[in-house]
Amino acid sequence: MRNHKLRIVTNYFIVSLAVADTLVAIFAMTFNAFYTITDRWVFPAYVCDLWNSCDVLFSTASILHLCCISVDRYYAIVRPFEYAELMSKRNCRIILACVWTSSTLISFIPIFTNIYTTDEHLVERELMPYECNFVVNKPYAVVSSCVSFWVPSMIMIGAYVRIFSKQSGKKS
């Protein structure tokens, strides 16, 4: 923050990615380690939902940040004359807000409203409060995996293929 030369769009994405990854370590991995070591869930059910929501939220945010970085690099390399206009600090803030908002929507709302899972799992949770398993239904699995993995992966692959082909074209 102190060095004005480092306040470039790419670094905003990288810092936000670092925040997401740090939050995965703090919120998701800590509970996972505790649950793995003790082999039982000792917290209330809402903490289980909070843990699962944080895991989905921060993991999704992390992947979406990687996608944003690939698009940022695509425009910087393949369309350098359009880059400054397209990747302004204002647009970067809007993109980052969309990343965090979509990650929150795909995690907290479905998990805390129980639309992410099956009726059988909800009954199982009542009968076994010492367990904290993340069982998803098919619609949530499809939507969540598309938003959190498949679509960002396709965008990243497309961006990096175009970057590579642009760079390969320059060398010949």
Image (spheres, rainbow, N blue to C red):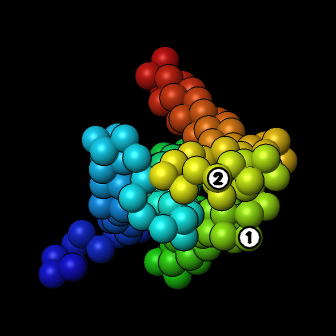
Whether residue 155 is visible here, answered yes or no, is no
Q: Nearer the viewer, residue 163 or 157?
A: 157
Query: Secondary structure under badge 1?
Result: loop
Q: Nearer the viewer, residue 128 or 90?
A: 128
- x, y percent for residue 126: 65, 58
- x, y percent for residue 73: 47, 49
Which residue corresponds to the image point at 44% horizontal and 22% vertical from the top-left?
171
Count how many numbered circles sit on residues in the image: 2
Instruction: Find the residue positioned furthest to the front.
Output: 127
Query: Secondary structure under badge 2?
Result: helix
Judged left or right of residue 7, residue 164 is right
Which residue corresponds to the image point at 21% horizontal and 79% vertical from the top-left?
1
Q: Amino acid at mark 1?
A: Thr
Q: N-terminal of the two: label 2 or label 1?
A: 1
Q: Nearer the viewer, residue 123 or 63?
A: 123
Question: Relative to residue 115, is residue 37 depicted above or below?
Answer: above
- x, y percent for residue 162: 60, 34
- The circle drawn on residue 113 is 1
Question: Relative to residue 71, is residue 81 depicted above or below?
Answer: below
Q: Amino acid at mark 2?
A: Leu
